[in-house]
Amino acid sequence: MVYQLLYSLFQNFIRLIYRVCKPFIKAEYVIIAGMQAKYFSGNNQYLFDYLDDKKVNFKFYFFTKDKKEYNRLKSKYPNKILYAFQFRAMVKLFKAKILITTTGSDDFSPYPLFEKMGIINIWHGMPIKKLGEPKTDIIAKKLKIFIDSLNYFCVSSEFDGNHISKAFNIEKERIAITGIAKNDFINYSYSNTLKKNSYLNNKVILYAPTFREKGITQLSFDKLVDITKLNTLLEKYNAYFLYRSHFNTEESKVVDGYKRIMAASSNEFPDPQPLLFYSDILITDYSGIYFDYLLMNRPIIFYNYDYDDYLIERGFQFDFNENTPGPKVNNQSDLLNAIEEYLINPDKDKGFREEIKKKFHKYEDGKACERTYELIKSLM
């Protein structure tokens, strides 16, 4: 409670300073926030890099309150990275014309969003999981203020936009079907990733499960997969299996010692999109990563060993079975069988995948950043 009170007092104080200074400020900057005011990843990373490569005619910055992230980025992008707890960051925010978020107003924490600035939410990905209801009236009020402040909320398709519109009670006129910035990965080559990880030139199976929240059991990898049989299958088809644990979970160490089974967490691969580019099969459960992978029209296996529990605890944004184009398996044996079937015949279920891809992606051209850039220019 004390922290919340001090935080609120600080934000109100900053708002007051901004109102006093605003008549003397020329708004001119675009500032892209790190996810949760921290991470340079996903949509914010791809949009920032696009603007950096394009050499746009306006000044733009990346904002983070994570000191490690700031130190990691400042030499690569000289004078374009803002650390929240430096006076320079506040000055740049005061002079911002457009703020870009990926989750919500806390992306610019500890600062508030300022009125009469252009605000675009480029989001962090399409959700299959039911969007969580605000747990308190305070959070609900905060969410409403954020949604009301938005000029645009970026989505991938009309279907996606309709769900976002209903979930957040936002008018469709403010829903922008630009595509999701990180899905421009389909136009990349990721040659550096391949150079460092030459095994990606072979058959690659990526397992990327979602995070299990409190109340849902998170099984370790050795409980999910018969590792010995999996390794035999991989050797048979000269394939590799990558296990990407969610960034909120501890990395399983049981894959150590297997040459064809390896960890691919955010520690090894901060950006998952190169893994999608080089993977021949994706295995997931309820993670929205499969929406990105649909653009490759390659096999997807849904490993739903805890479907009933997950349905009760979290639920889905839309019908799960209708929108998941691939086999649903719930045990080790069926998982291995599904993997082998796709290794033999990767075109199996191709038509179903194509149908769902068109439903969730209006565009397949890898130009989401370009369309988002045009959106930014319309507000400058």
Image (cartoon, rainbow, N blue to C red):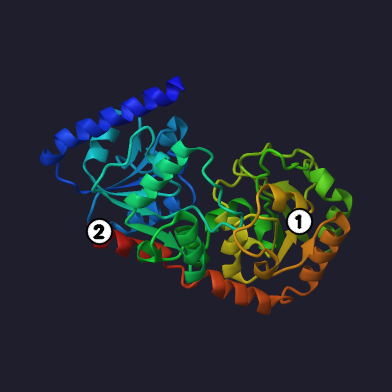
Badge 2: residue crowd in 10 Å (few <14, some 14–19, many ≥20): few
Based on the displayed image, in which of its 4 quarters is residue 179 positioned?
bottom left
| Residue 29 left/right relative to 107 | left
Asked whether residue 93 is in view, the answer is yes
> What residue would you read off at disc 2?
379
| Residue 175 left/right relative to 115 | right
Front position in the image: 309 or 352: 309
Residue found at the far front of this picture: 137
| Residue 281 left/right relative to 227 | left
| Image quarter (top left, top right, bottom left or bottom right) of the C terminus | bottom left
Image mark for residue 45: none
Q: Residue at x 66, y 39 (%)?
A: 249
**Image: 281 above or below 115:** below
| Residue 242 left/right relative to 271 | right
> What residue would you read off at disc 1?
304
**Image: 117 above or below 273:** above
Counting residues from the N terminus, which is met first, the one under dot 2 or under dot 1? 1
The amino acid marked with disc number 1 is Asn
- Secondary structure, mark 1, is loop
Image x and y of residue 338, in percent: 81, 65
Based on the displayed image, in which of its 4 quarters is residue 194 positioned?
bottom right
Residue found at the far left of this picture: 24
Q: Residue at x 77, y 68 (%)?
A: 343
Q: Residue at x 69, y 47 (%)?
A: 313
The amino acid marked with disc number 2 is Leu
As measured in the structure, the alpha-carbon distance from the residue carrying label 2 to the one carrying label 1 is 43 Å
